[in-house]
Image (cartoon, grey):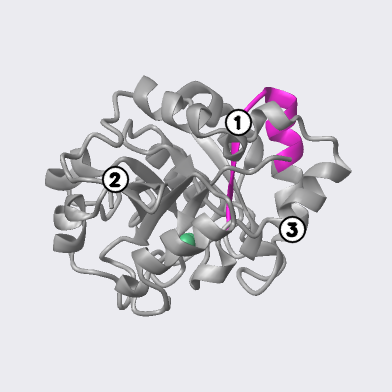
Amino acid sequence: MNIELDTHIHTIACNHAYSTITEIAQQAREKGLKLVCITEHGPKMPGGPHEYFFANIRVVPTEIGGVKILKGIESNITSYDGTLDLPPQYEDRMEIVLAGLHDMVLTPGSKKENTKAVIQAMRREIVDIMVHLGNPIYELDYDEIIKAAKDTRTFIEINNSSFLHSRKGSSSNCLLIAQKCMEHDIPISLGSDAHFAVDIAVYTHALEMLKSINFPEELVVNTSVDKLLNYLRGKGKKVLQDPRVKI
Ligand SMILES: [Zn+2]
Ligand SMILES: [Zn+2]
């Protein structure tokens, strides 16, 4: 599978990742990627950046060393009503919005509560990708969620780090989610969830799982920058339009 981009990357700004945007761009260039999404944790994550980080992120160039930089957020779902910690006044500055459940922000509830949280978040037009749904500490109704993804045109993430050191026990859920996405024609995005530059676009385990079920390449957004940009532009997002020069 030809991979052109990574939709889920963290920087030193969240205090538990260890590379700068420049280092990430450099690695991306070395790996032959065309685009990276900088999706820092929302402000409610312990140690997460202040909301001004998102307010001011437009100063980052749209391209560094030939690699396009999409500026976004991995917003925390903060209630079972699907509220997010992305300050509303900065919503239109985000070129891509990921949303997800994190137990240090929202305590896992019942299956019904967790499912409602995810679906209500997906119903917010601003949300583009729902991340790491395989996390076993949140029991979820995947059929309901996949149906809502179809209705709201939200992409579903398969998170490679869920197969490794994060969210232990996610693998079988990720497989189930991918099968359901395939069945219902829901596009997925592969997220490395890299917290260090060398880990960007590392999708080994996710790709192995997708291959085992013959997941169609056309449903994987990472195979084409245009696929991602067209999706975002189709939702009215102003992507790569900042006046900052390329460096
Ligand atoms: Zn996360
Ligand atoms: Zn993340």
Q: Residues within 10 Å of mark 1 (few under 14, many from 20)?
A: many
Task: State the residue at coordinates (33%, 30%).
Answer: 125
Which quadrant would residue 85 be assigned to in this image? bottom left
The label shown at residue 187 is: 1
Indicate which disc, 1 or 3, sits on the residue closer to the N terminus: 1
Q: Residues within 10 Å of mark 2 (few under 14, many from 20)?
A: many
Marks 1 and 3 sit apart, C-alpha to C-alpha, by 19 Å
Number of the front mark, 1 or 3: 3
Range covered by the magenta-colored residues: 178-192
- Residue 100 screen position, x and y as percent: 45, 53
Relative horizontal placement of residue 152, taking residue 178 as reference (left or right): left
The front one of 236 and 122 is 236
Query: Is residue 195 in view?
Result: yes
Indicate which disc, 3 or 2, sits on the residue closer to the N terminus: 2
Number of the front mark, 2 or 1: 2
Three-letter amino acid code at the position of disc 1 = Pro
- Residue 108 screen position, x and y as percent: 50, 63
Which residue position is annotated with label 2?
A: 62
- Residue 74 screen position, x and y as percent: 38, 55
Task: State the residue at coordinates (78%, 44%).
Answer: 210
Three-letter amino acid code at the position of disc 3 = Thr
Q: Is residue 95 above or below residue 183?
A: below
Number of the front mark, 3 or 2: 2
Which residue position is annotated with label 3?
A: 204
Confirm or deny contact between disc 2 and disc 1 (CB under 8 A).
Answer: no
Which quadrant would residue 215 be assigned to in this image? top right
Marks 2 and 1 sit apart, C-alpha to C-alpha, by 25 Å
Q: Residues within 10 Å of mark 3 (few under 14, many from 20)?
A: few
